[in-house]
Amino acid sequence: MLRIITQWVEAQAELRRITERTHDDMAIHKEATVREILGSVREQGDEAVLHYTAEFDHITLTPEELKVSGSELDAAYQQVNKDLLNAIRLAAKQIEAFHRQRVPKSWVSFGDDEIVLGKRYTPVDRAGLYVPGGQAAYPSTVLMNAVPAKVAKVPRIVMVTPPAQGKKINPAVLVAAQEAGIQEIYRIGGAQAIGALAYGTDTIPKVDVITGPGNIYVTLAKKIVYGTVGIDSLAGPSEVLIIADSEANPVHVAADMLAQAEHDSLASAILLTTDSALARQVVTEVERQLKDHPRRTLTEKAIAHYGLVVVVESLKAAAQLSNQFAPEHLELQVSDPWALVEQIRHAGAIFLGCSTPEAVGDYLAGPNHTLPTSGAARYASALGVETFMKHSSLIQYSPTALQKVAEAIDVLATAEGLPSHANSVRLRRKDREHEEEWTKNEEQNDPKKT
């Protein structure tokens, strides 16, 4: 049963509780297990990867079976119906179009004092994409990770995904990967897959960046290998927060809340509304839509523990609560969403208007659906082209420009107790002064120049 809250202090406390929720599996023994797996993969490579795949996934592979074959990739197209193929292609097109607008541009500026400054962007050499698998299939996750990497022009992109029984990878996942330009795919998952990407094995290349969501073992593995490689984020349970006024349709609001709750028993679905009648209608509608829900047990658990309806006195108050929560997904189902969005400071993705359900962003609007969770939207952003790129500063000083700042650098370096720093500039300054003095004497002694 969804709870309706009308008290501000209670609403703040409940939102804080939901933000701070964690997997029970985040116990020390889980992290110890992951560290053991990663250590084994680092030392034993493919042997450890195959061992843990057999132990946890109950699938026995040989080193030759780790990589998905070309014939299996070709066959996937025969197993995907035309409507799904067209939907994958449309989504890939939309995602690529959006991310091409986000490619950071290198730049150089030329100052008046013979100083050149700039920033040069380059892609990482190798990227590893993790896609959840087994009994589930997420072609949209493939596209959201692979397309930005391709747009960033990463030279080598590899994908890992756990197989189902029979060592098979879902054909829709394989088709999505190929539509995004990914041909190098390995049938492994879990912490051992993260270890293989982070450290490299005889079969699987070491990468520079790992992206993609996974279970608690995958998340902990990404946390541990961060620093050896870059990662996109540490994804927590999914969440949606909806701000609605009297213009919102309670049937639609309820459907959007359930669309988030069906992800995971830890997913959260929150409604902030200025209309108490709408609040009651949404609670009733959620219960109605849950009755015949295919994932009722899981979804009902999420709604019971992390579902919430809060009645607020104004949209301004709703925006304040939303900013405190910093939701992964924020829907503004109000009459004037563009006015309200000006009051929003923290959200992973914002969906404006009653005709823009969060599902649009999950699949093919274009912006990435890999978003910060658990309040991380206060400081983090969605996965994008920038995730697969880094930048180098460009700095060039002429001898004249260096002379002008040499004394200040000398003073600062001396104050910090770094004499060689100071000397590296001091020597150049003296050489420049000697050169100028020599040139002056030459001009005075040369009759042709007087």
Image: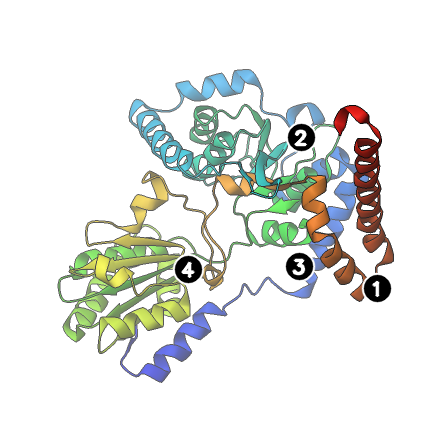
Looking at the rendered structure, which numbered label has been put on residue 267? 4
Residue designated by label 3: 30
The residue lying toward the viewer, choosing from 29 and 365, is 365
Q: Quadrant of residue 50?
A: top right
Q: Quadrant of residue 15?
A: bottom left
Residue designated by label 1: 417
Residue designated by label 2: 61
**Left or right of 373: which side holds 343?**
left
**Circle 1: is it few (<14), some (14-19), or many (20+) Cα within 10 Å?**
few
- Counting residues from the start of the chain, the first of labels 1 and 3 encountered is 3
In the image, what residue occupies the spot 40% across and 32% down? 96
Q: Quadrant of residue 281?
A: bottom left
x, y percentage for residue 185?
Answer: 57, 28
Q: Nearer the viewer, mark 4 or mark 2?
A: 4
x, y percentage for residue 277?
Answer: 14, 73
The kind of residue tagged 4 is Ala
The answer to whether 224 is drawn above or below residue 393 in the figure is below
